[in-house]
Image (cartoon, rainbow, N blue to C red):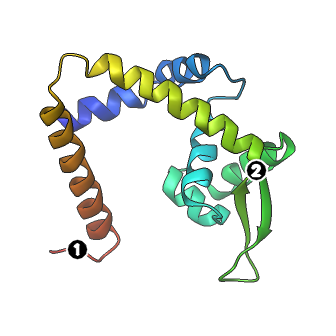
Amino acid sequence: MALISVVSVLNRPEVDERLVRDAGIALDRALFPLLVVIERLGPIGVVDLAGRAGRDYTTVSRQVTKLETLGLVQRQASETDARVRAAAVTPKGKAMTDALDAARERMARKLFAEWSEADVDTLVNLLQRFATDIEAQTMGKGRA
C-alpha cells in the first residue's frame, strides 16, 4: 500500500508542474521526464525510451522531435544498431536537467529535514536494491 501511495503522489500532474516551476524552466511537463531519461540513459532509441516511459512509440517519437526542435536533444546514429537513430542530450538540455536536479534536491531537503542521516541512507539503499531487483525480475533476469 505504501508503494501505491508514493507512486500516486509522484504521478500527479501538479507535482511535475511544481518541479518545472521550481526549476525555473519553461518546458511542457510531458516532455521533461523524457528529457531526464535521455540525459541519464542516452543516447537511447525511441522504442527503448517509449518502453521506459510507459508511452506509445509514436507519441514519444513526436515528443522527442519537439525536444529536438527546442535544441534540448539531438538524434544520432546508434553505436549498436545502424538502423536506429538514438536521442542524446545537448548542452542546453543538460543545463535544463541540472536545473531540474537542483529543484529536486531542494524538495528532498525539505521532505527529509526531520529524518536522520542514517534513515535517509537506509531508504536510498533499500530503494536502489528494490529498483535493481524489480528491473531484473521484470526483464526476465530475476529469481522466480
Q: Can residue 6 be seen in the rendering of this structure?
A: yes
Q: Which residue of the protein is positioned furthest toward the right in this rendering?
A: 69
Which residue in the protein does label 2 denote? 90
Q: What kind of element bears circle 2?
A: loop
In the picture shown, does residue 63 fall above or below 109?
below
Instruction: Rate crowding at label 2 as few (under 14), some (14 to 19) or many (20 or more) other CA atoms within 10 Å.
Output: some
- Is 88 situated above or below 91? below
Check the picture and name the quadrant holding the N terminus.
top left
Locate residue 143 relative to residue 5 in the image: left or right. left
Q: Name the residue: 14% across, 26% down.
A: 116
Three-letter amino acid code at the position of disc 2: Thr
Give 84 or 72, whichever is nearer the viewer.
72
Taking the spot 25% from the left edge, 22% from the top edge, the residue there is 112
Location of residue 109 (image quadrant): top left
| Residue picked out by circle 1 | 142
Q: First in sequence: mark 2 or mark 1?
A: 2
Asked where in the image residue 32 lies, by quadrant, the reply is: top right
Estimate the x, y position of residue 106 in percent, counting from the top left: 43, 21
Secondary-structure class at tag 1: loop
The quadrant of the image that shows the C terminus is: bottom left
Circle 1: residue type: Gly
Q: Where residue 113 sits in the image (x, y, percent)?
A: 25, 17
Q: Nearer the viewer, residue 1 or 32?
A: 32
Percent coordinates x, y for residue 57 in the rendering: 65, 58
